[in-house]
Image (tube, helix red, strand yellow):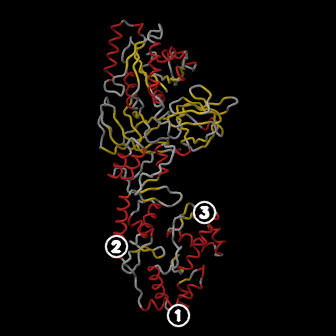
Amino acid sequence: MIIGTAGHIDHGKTTLVAALTGVNTDRLPEERRRGVSIELGYAFMDGPQGLRIGFIDVPGHERLVHTMVSGATGMDMAMLLVAADDGVMPQTREHLAVLSLLGIRHGLVVVTKCDRADEARVAAVAAEVRGLMADSTLAGADVRCVSAHTGQGIDALREHLWQAAARLGPHRRVGDAFRLAVDRSFTLSGIGTVVTGTVHAGHVRVGDELVCVPGGRRMRVRSLHAQNREVTQALAGERCALGLAGVEREDIWRGQWLADPAVALETERLDARLTLWPGESHALRSGTQVHVHLGAEDVLASVAVLEPQVIEPGGSGMVQLVLRRPMGAWHGDRLIVRDASASRTLAGATVLDPFAPTRYRRTAARLAMLRALEATQPEQRLADALASSPQGIDLRRWQAAQGLLALPSGDHLPDVLRATEAQADMLLSAAEAANAEARVLQMLAAFHERHPDELGPDAGRLRRLALPRLPEPLWRALLARVREQGKVLLKGALVHLPEHGVRLSETEQRIAQKVAPALTGARYEGAWVRDLARAAAEPDALVRATLSRLGQRGDLHQVVRDLFYPPATMAELATLCRAVAEAHEGAVRAADYRDATGLGRKRAIQILEYFDRVGLLRRVGDTHHLRRDCQLFMEAGL
């Protein structure tokens, strides 16, 4: 367990920790010379049954609240200190606000320097503090009166802390993926780069690979200390020092995170539920510039209030925080929001989605999704979020955002539509899949009515018409489902309703028969309209119109203007494309495909770009990647 101090400057925080542990947490010469804490201090205390408590001692100066916040985000329990001679002071109030906005519910108040005041004064200060805490998360907390100078109450306080540690038990996020907030980095002779911080979730072992975020640099854990002891494993709720291999001290700094690779993420935009401190005099509005504190990081940001339009003092609402630079953030993380000048604490917030959208952020569907993300259990959050997501959910992205060690199986959601592509673990709820299916059928019917002479749009065009925001893996799964159910037919890349067809005129049938041998004989080079017209002794315009009609029926494939291929030849070219992909881990480069087909580079590129358009491939940079779940050109006649 980690206990943190809080309170006004010179109210005895460092002295009390020293009285409990025997450790002076002021390690800097300037701190010892001035008697003022500047940086976070750390100490440890051993107790019964192998218990070990770590202490984070925070500075109390008003200009160092940002340092206090970085320590407070790692606390399991807080000790709010108030000196008997001074009573409640400004930083007493602000530190209490920080603790409350972070949702810290385990704590106590310690009235210090009781040797400097009589019993009446001590009782009055204790009563004042109880009243101050009445509207905070520490309402009803115990109040202890001590004097570090005389030893009064120290033993009883120490025993109280051991009992509290035993009651708290294991950290609530010990089962999640590992995350540590870095607050120091340095070099030790014989060890190399060392970082220290508080473990916010999960566990880490010697030999584990971690990712530094933001940045994405990978490194390996060479050695490990937890709670100031050499160990082979460290857990959530412990102070930790990691010796790292594969990174220099200059490459990692305070404010970054070390995270399990499965959940390593960084964001410049996150959605959260924000609560404005009741003591604020003005409502929070969109456009407000703020400081956002998470872990040991402090980032400037702009607030976009999503719901309601403004947040009144003491109220809460959904907001999007647009950050000036990337930071690591995960669902459930608690933030502190301070004003643009960093002079006062405004609000606290809980991260709901670190993958916040830039568009459609205030739609009813998006707000419903954010409310779903407030469910307590991950399984319920997933179910509720699916029900609120017309675009479905990517499970791997979901896992990273939630900070979960294991990928949710979704087995408790048997009716969902599942993407079949190997690289896309995506789900769409049964209700949203039914809505999407109805939209596709409606759009196809409208297309047939507007374009009676065309067989139908290709699959890519139909998606743009009907469901432009649905991710492609889910789109292909949906299309496969309605096709299997016989609700639509595919001819080549064209989609149409079963009752719709395109008839050829007698002239078009005659020309189609005349050009068929030349189309087949052209093989992989394809046939140009002018060449087919010359061979058939027919006008170019008539041949072009006929071939276009055959393309609309799905009987030919038009790769570029006036260049046509019959289905059988296109199927052969697709087979060669799949073979190249299998030989190169799914990638198809123009040079490899040129060699496989014997074509020139220009024609090979034209064919690959056609495969991109119809959905057999997807282009990333200069490389085309095979869509492994695509069934195009795998059936006779297609």
The dot on residue 537 is 1
Secondary structure state at the residue bearing disc 2: helix
The dot on residue 445 is 2
Q: Residue 425 location in percent, x, y?
A: 49, 55
Secondary structure state at the residue bearing disc 3: strand
Q: Residue 278 location in percent, x, y?
A: 31, 30
Q: Mark 1 near mark 2, Cβ–Cβ under 8 Å?
A: no
Q: Residue 351 location in percent, x, y?
A: 42, 41
Which residue position holds label 3? 587
Q: Quadrant of residue 483?
A: bottom left
Query: Does 497 sit above or below residue 340?
Result: below
Which residue sits at x=68%, y=31%?
191
Q: Earlier in the sequence, mark 1 or mark 2?
A: 2
Query: Does 568 sit above or below residue 586?
Result: below
Q: Residue 83 location in percent, x, y?
A: 40, 14
Asked if residue 377 lies left or right of residue 36, the reply is left
Q: Earlier in the sequence, mark 3 or mark 1?
A: 1
